[in-house]
Image (tube, helix red, strand yellow):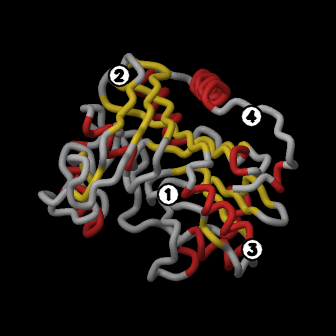
Amino acid sequence: MLDPAEALPPPQAPLVDPNELKSWVLLDDARLLVLDKPGWLVVHPSKNGPWSSLAGAVREGLGLQTIRLIYRLDRETSGVVILAKDEATGSRLQKAVGKRLLGKGYVAILEGELREPVNVNRPLGPDTESRVTVRQRVVESGGPGAQEAQTLLTPLVVAGGFTLVGVQLITGRKHQIRAHAESIGHRVVGDKLYGPDSTLYLEFAEHGWTARHSALLALTRQALHCAVIDLRPSGFDYLLRAPWPQDMARFAEKRMGLTRAEAERLIDAFVAEKFPAPLPRATAPDQAPL
């Protein structure tokens, strides 16, 4: 059940505050803009105007008309988002994504106690039995819509009936972490679609947060954060980090007894182990072929 002290989300996501936008910038150079997306904001333009999406806010607030998203994050997933400022950089990085040359590390809070690392290597495809058309599920290999999907889950701390995990994506499928977590019986905390009742997703879309959400969900958004993107294997010398978000930190402290400082120490250690510096290469980083 939701802690009464948690701030509830508004029925509709707020518009981006232009004064806050610049505080999300993690990197801004000649080729790349990297932002720490909050967990209430959609990435792509929406019908509610430019300030209702990350892409629209960047164009309006930062004056960048030519931007190319390298990948997307779900609305309720926070963390690192990369935008290319020119077509050549965007094309190069999207090719790198296709060749799985980008390292992707997430942090999530899961329901239950996951005490050993898990390699979930099971295909995902549309959940044809769900009322929610976007929902994915584990399916048989070779079946209709089946896509290879592999997720590595590493427990960082177990406490209070929850697990803080570091996550590596080997593939990048729609809702991959959330669907794989649900498939092993450890759902992402606060997940409206892959949580205890997927109709919570439809109900939230139509009515916003309701009493039923408070009764069934422990957090007002899914506890999933893109903590690190490693561009170094693709030839760009960047390891991009987004800080531990305030709402997940508050939940971990209240429900798991995990202080912000200790959580950050564990996440830093996970990143250092899973995304070490690559060996020196003969060609200059930006000239390395894809």
Residue behind mark 2:
114
Q: Nearer the viewer, mark 1 or mark 4?
A: 4
User: Which residue is the site of mark 4?
Assistant: 278
Q: Nearer the viewer, mark 3 or mark 4?
A: 4
**Mark 1 or 3, nearer chain start:** 1
Q: Quadrant of residue 183?
A: top left
Q: Nearer the viewer, mark 1 or mark 3?
A: 3
Q: Amino acid at mark 3?
A: Asp
**Residue 86 got which mark?**
3
Type of amino acid at the residue the image marks with label 2: Leu
Q: Residue at x 46, y 43 (%)?
A: 224
Residues tagged 1 and 4 counted as in contact (Cβ below 8 A): no
Q: CA distance from mark 2 to mark 4?
A: 30 Å
Which residue position is annotated with label 1?
Answer: 73
In the rendered structure, which amino acid carries the disc numbered 4?
Pro
Q: Which mark is residue 172?
A: none
Q: CA distance from mark 3 to mark 4?
A: 26 Å
Query: Could you give the CA–CA distance between mark 1 and mark 3, rounded to whole angstroms?
Result: 21 Å
Residue 284's x, y, as percent? 87, 49
Name the side, left or right, on which 83 lies relative to 42. Answer: right
Q: Nearer the viewer, mark 2 or mark 3?
A: 3
Give SS at disc 2. loop
Q: Is residue 220 visible?
A: no
Q: CA distance from mark 1 to mark 2?
A: 25 Å
The quadrant where residue 162 appears: top left
Instruction: Give x and y (percent) for residue 199.
Output: 18, 57
Between discs 2 and 4, the one toward the N terminus: 2
Question: Which sits earlier in the primary sequence, circle 2 or circle 3?
Answer: 3
Mark 3 residue element: loop
Is 242 located above or below residue 135 in the figure?
Answer: above
